[in-house]
Amino acid sequence: MPKLVLHAGDFTFDGRFEDELAPKTVAAFRKAMPFESQAIHVRWSGEAVWMPLGDLDFGVGYENHTSYPAPGQVILYPGGISETEILLGYGGVHFASKMGQLAGNHFITLTSGLDRLAELGKTVLWKGAQKVRFEEV
């Protein structure tokens, strides 16, 4: 079985797909892999980085959605009142936009490197956008 890997700037994390909790989101995201974007620091949500995706449509609705992802949880906001985005929490998060509270589908959980998440967050905050790549190896 392939291993899920997230590269973010100089950081690398292993992860797992939440196949049972968010099967439609996982299936749609797998079709888009390897997935590349840039992570920037959130503006309203607290301690997280996000990948703004504009009007990209993964064709999924809400499943296993939360407004409070824990550190190491990756969520996909499928679009609607705000643009489509992927968010990775590294500390306390209350997922929101200028439109108010949002909820995203928790579909990936990081399983290694969690002790470096805060360092990733601070790097993005102070040094700017970082390239991101999700891949299965």
Image (cartoon, rainbow, N blue to C red):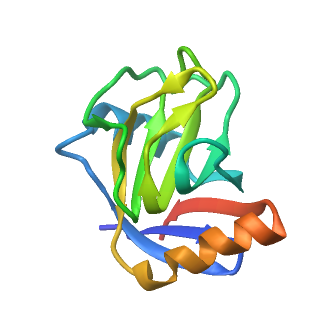
Up-down: is 81 above or below 90?
above
Q: In the rendered view, does 77 fall on the left or right side of 21?
A: right
Residue toward you, 77 or 66: 66
- The x and y percentages for residue 109 are 34, 60
- The x and y percentages for residue 83 are 63, 25
Up-down: is 89 above or below 2?
above
Q: Which quarter of the picture shows residue 130?
A: bottom right
- Residue at 42% across, 59% down: 92
Q: In the rendered view, does 53 fall on the left or right side of 47?
A: right
- Residue at 71% across, 74% down: 123
Residue toward you, 34 or 56: 56
Residue toward you, 64 or 119: 119
Q: Which quarter of the picture shows residue 105?
A: top left
Q: Which quarter of the picture shows residue 73?
A: bottom left
Up-down: is 14 above or below 80?
below
* Quadrant housing the N terminus: bottom left
Q: In the rendered view, does 117 fall on the left or right side of 72?
A: right
Q: How many marks?
A: 0
- Residue at 24% across, 47% down: 19
Residue positioned most to the top? 81
Q: In the rendered view, does 14 fall on the left or right side of 119?
A: left
- Residue at 53% across, 67% down: 6
Residue positioned most to the left? 20
- The x and y percentages for residue 65 are 31, 34
- The x and y percentages for residue 32 are 55, 41
